[in-house]
Image (cartoon, coloured by chain):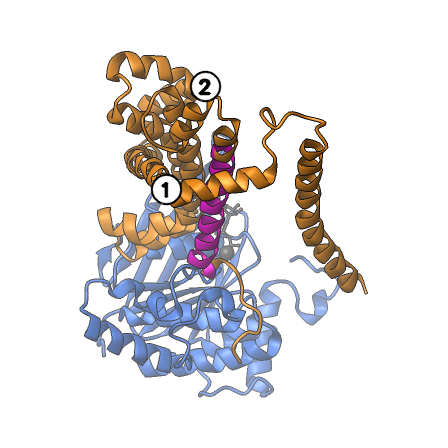
Amino acid sequence: MSNNKGTLEIRNLSKSFIVDNSPLQILNNINLTVTSGSFVSIVGSSGCGKTTLLRIILGLENHYDGEALMDGKQIVGPGTNRGIVFQDHRLLPWLTVGENVAFGLDKLNRKEKKLLVDEHLQLVGLIGFESVYPSQLSGGMAQRVAIARALANKPEMLLLDEPLGALDALTRMYMQKELERLWQLEKITMIMVTHDIEEAIYLSDKVVIMSSRPGIIKQIIDVSSSRPRDRASSEFMQIKAEILEEFHLGTEYTFAYAI
Amino acid sequence: MAKKFLQRLGLKDKLLAIIVPLLVLAAWQGAVSQKLCSELILTPPLTLLNTLLELAQSGDLTLNILASLKRVMIGFLLGGTSGFVIGILMALSPFLNRIFGPLIKALQQVPEFAWMPLIIMFLGIDEFAKYFFVAIGAFYPMVLNTYQGVSGVPEKYHELARVFDYKSFRYLFKVIIPSALPSIITGIRLSLGLSWMFVVGAELFGSDSGVGYLMTWGRAVFQIDLVMAGLILVGVIGFAMNFLLERAEKQFLLWREPVDGRPA
Ligand SMILES: Nc1ncnc2c1ncn2[C@@H]1O[C@H](COP(=O)(O)OP(=O)(O)O)[C@@H](O)[C@H]1O
Ligand SMILES: [Mg+2]
């Protein structure tokens, strides 16, 4: 759909929070370019500022140094060109699945709403669950509803904050496939934060490796293998080794566990 | 094992809840018929039942209950609605909270019945004075619970509203109030409960109808059975209102509870 939409340009971005009356630097001089329609993963240990970076791109954090440009325009707040899947699925418990998916479609009329809701529930494989409440869903289903809610708004960029973090290994692998399918279908830019290096390699064109205190980008690794990717292929293993190296977890550092 | 034991305990509790009052009633009836206590002072249960039936037959029962309920509804709507609106405003505006907060906290220290002399002085003992008195009772639980509910809306929902561009009334009605609903409904239940107590209080002070009036009238003509029948009515109606509202609360907040048997 979008030809050149959904690009992101981050230049010399630094961010501090005030903690105990003094500024604590969280992000330090971040530079990142995300091209239209690409899939980018951000990996890094807990607390290195991944969520903060995503919140800046989303427009929820407004006080920072440097620039964050979406399609060439400075980001000043949330906008419908960016969708988000929060780390906690953040569905509204008093709304049904269908109403949650329609949450961002309030300005449309009933018929248009229903069409979009059906389309996106179909997309995430949850047709028939419209009238179920979130408390009745499993973690994976709730996360899929959150994805449907974000996509229904037709964003040009989807931000995902550890969307599969709470799922068991098998559901997780299934959902990775699903995410890849959705990304190929929607042809939008996706930026995903994850703890899982294999997940990042499986899905991404680009893996951004961050390290902490203060958060910097340590390395950006391009992954150009053809899709769907084989986790057991030597190419895959090699990239994984390369990334582990960055975390000092390569084979020669076996005893230097740092995370 | 443990479950069975608990179930039996639950059943036993329910049986006790029925048996104990029955025993008390029987002892009461027995005490009076054995002349341990004068019938004029402690009306026996069977006589009370008779009094209630007579009241029902003459139409006095319905008339007086309806009179009280009408005052409850009007007073509750006045006090509850203002409590609801002020509670929301206080929770959303730090400025209004600074203005109303201390005032409401200070006024809360005044026992509500202490308002009665003032109300009588300014408004007399007519219908409006009664509505006003009931409204005072209805106001506090509503303003406090609404305030708590709305200030307790989690930050994550405020953020979600920002992301999806919810503003003003849409934000209020589709995010804030639903999130605060459990608190608000508790407020409604407490508020109605107090309204009921207050209406009886107001009617005791001077009235020509209502359940409270039945009791003052009974006292005036020294008909203890009327006074006691009034007491029973107050208890039963208050209990019924609370019971119905608790049921409605459960029904209304179904989404809160995970339902057994997840869909496949
Ligand atoms: N609003 C805030 N105020 C103060 N410190 C914060 C705030 N938000 C995040 N932080 C701190 O910033 C650091 C990075 O947080 P976050 O971006 O959530 O990390 P990650 O998502 O990589 O685990 C953490 O140390 C966290 O405690
Ligand atoms: Mg995080």
Residue plotted at (71% across, 32% down): B31
Q: Indicate the position of residue B71 as horizontal and vertical percent values.
A: 31, 34
Q: Quadrant of residue A155?
A: bottom left
Which span of residues is magenta-colored?
Answer: B230-254
Label of residue B111 in the image: 2
Q: CA distance from mark 1 to mark 2?
A: 37 Å
What SS does tag 1 mark? helix
Subunit of label 2:
B
Subunit of label 1:
B
Q: Residues within 10 Å of mark 1 (few under 14, many from 20)?
A: few
**Which of these two is toward me, A22 or B48?**
B48
**Which of these two is toward me, B126 or B60?**
B60
Q: Earlier in the sequence, mark 1 or mark 2?
A: 1
What SS does tag 2 mark? loop
Q: Is residue A166 above or below residue B117?
A: below
- Please indicate, yes or no, whether residue B37 appears anywhere in the rendered image: yes
Total labels drawn: 2
Q: Is residue B189 above or below residue A241?
A: above
Residue plotted at (39% across, 45% down): B57
Q: Colour of chain B?
A: orange
Residue B238 covered by magenta stretch: yes
Residue occupying the far right of the picture: B1
Q: Colour of chain A?
A: blue
Q: Quarter of the image for the C terminus of chain A: give it.
A: bottom right
Q: Foreground mark, 1 or 2? A: 1
Residue corresponding to mark 1: B58
Q: Quadrant of residue A186?
A: bottom left
Q: Indicate the position of residue B151 as horizontal and vertical percent values.
A: 40, 39
Q: Position of A197 compared to A3: left or right?
A: right
- Please indicate, yes or no, whether residue A25 appears anywhere in the rendered image: no
Q: Indicate the position of residue B122 as horizontal and vertical percent values.
A: 25, 14
